[in-house]
Image: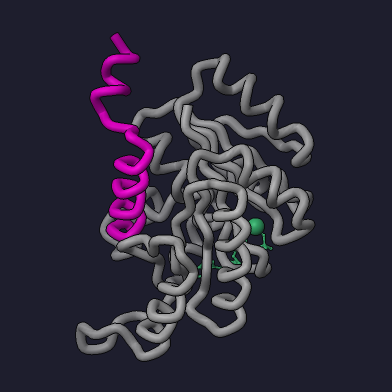
Amino acid sequence: MKTLAVISRKGGAGKTTLSINLILSAYQAGWKTLLADIDPQRSASDALRARAEPGPALAEITAGKLFHTRSQAAHDAYDVMLIDTPAAPDADVVLAVNSADLCLLVCRPTFLDIASAARSAEMIRRLGKAGLIVLNQAPSKRGGLEPASMRQAIEALRFCGLPIAPVGLRSRTIYQQAIARGLSVGEWDAQAPAVQEIDRLWSHLAALLALDDRGRDARAV
Ligand SMILES: Nc1ncnc2c1ncn2[C@@H]1O[C@H](COP(=O)(O)OP(=O)(O)OP(=O)(O)O)[C@@H](O)[C@H]1O
Ligand SMILES: [Mg+2]
C-alpha cells in the first residue's frame, strides 16, 4: 500500500480540493482506495458523503489514529491511502508526514504561501520523507506564457529543496462546482481543461509511487 499525505500549513491552499481529485483518480484507475480525513473541519468527508456514486472508503479519524488506520488498511489490502490534513496543529501534520510514503505540499503562488511552504519543506526533509510541491490556484497562462507571479513562485520554490510537480492546478471554478457534489472534475465535465491537469498529475504520482497497471492487473488475477 502507498500512503500520500496532502499538507500545507496555510489554510485554504487547496489540500482538500487536491485530496478529493487525487483519491478519485486513484479510485477510477481501479485501485482500492481510502481517504483518511484527520481535519476536524471534515471537509473531505463532507465532499465524499455528497457523492451519489460509489467511491473511495472514508476514515474520519484523529491524527492519533493514523498509525492504526494505516496498519488496518494495509491488512485489508488497500492500494492507496491518502491523508487530508488540517493546517494546524503542527503535531498532527507531523504525524501525517511520518505516515506517508510521499508528501504533497500544496502551495499557492503567493509570497505568504511560499514562505510557509519553505518551512514545511524543511520539516519534510528533517523527517527524512519524500516530498513534492504542487502549485494550486495558479493564474492561467497568457498568450501561452506563465504570468510573472508564476515564474517568480517557481523560482522561489526552487530553494525549498523539494521537487516541484511538473503540472499544477490552475484557478478554475470547476474545482468548486465538482467538489460540492463529491465529484472529480472529470466526472463533472470530461472535456474541461482541469481534467488534463489532474490526469497528468495523477500519472506523475502513480509513476513516483510505482503504482503501475501491471501491479493492479496482477492483483486482480
Ligand atoms: N484550483 C482551484 N481553483 C478554484 N478554486 C479552488 C482551487 N483550489 C481550491 N479552491 C477553493 O479554495 C477554497 C479552499 O480550498 P480547500 O478547502 O481545498 O483548501 P484547504 O487547504 O483544504 O483548506 P483548509 O486549510 O481549511 O483545510 C475552497 O473554496 C475551494 O473550492
Ligand atoms: Mg481542507
Q: Residue at x 63, y 41 (%)?
A: 98
Q: Residue at x 61, y 63 (%)?
A: 120
Can you say whether 209 is above or below 68 in the image? Answer: below
Range of magenta residues: 195-221
Image quadrant where residue 72 sits: top right
Foreground pick, 186 / 9: 9
Image quadrant where residue 69 sits: top right
Q: What kind of secondary structure does the magenta stretch mostly adopt?
A: helix
Can you say whether 172 is above or below 85 in the image? Answer: below
Q: Check residue 211 for magenta coloring.
A: yes
Q: Quadrant of the C terminus?
A: top left
Foreground pick, 119 / 15: 119
Picture quadrant of ligand 2? bottom right
Residue 198, position in %: x, y? 36, 55
Q: Residue at x 53, y 46 (%)?
A: 129
Indicate left or right for 45 with 141 as reference: right
Residue 197, position in %: x, y? 32, 60
Q: Residue at x 57, y 15 (%)?
A: 75
Would residue 52 be seen by someone viewing this image from the given angle? no
Residue 159, position in %: x, y? 45, 74
Q: Residue furthest left?
A: 144
Q: Check residue 128 for magenta coloring.
A: no
Indicate left or right for 61 with 210 as reference: right
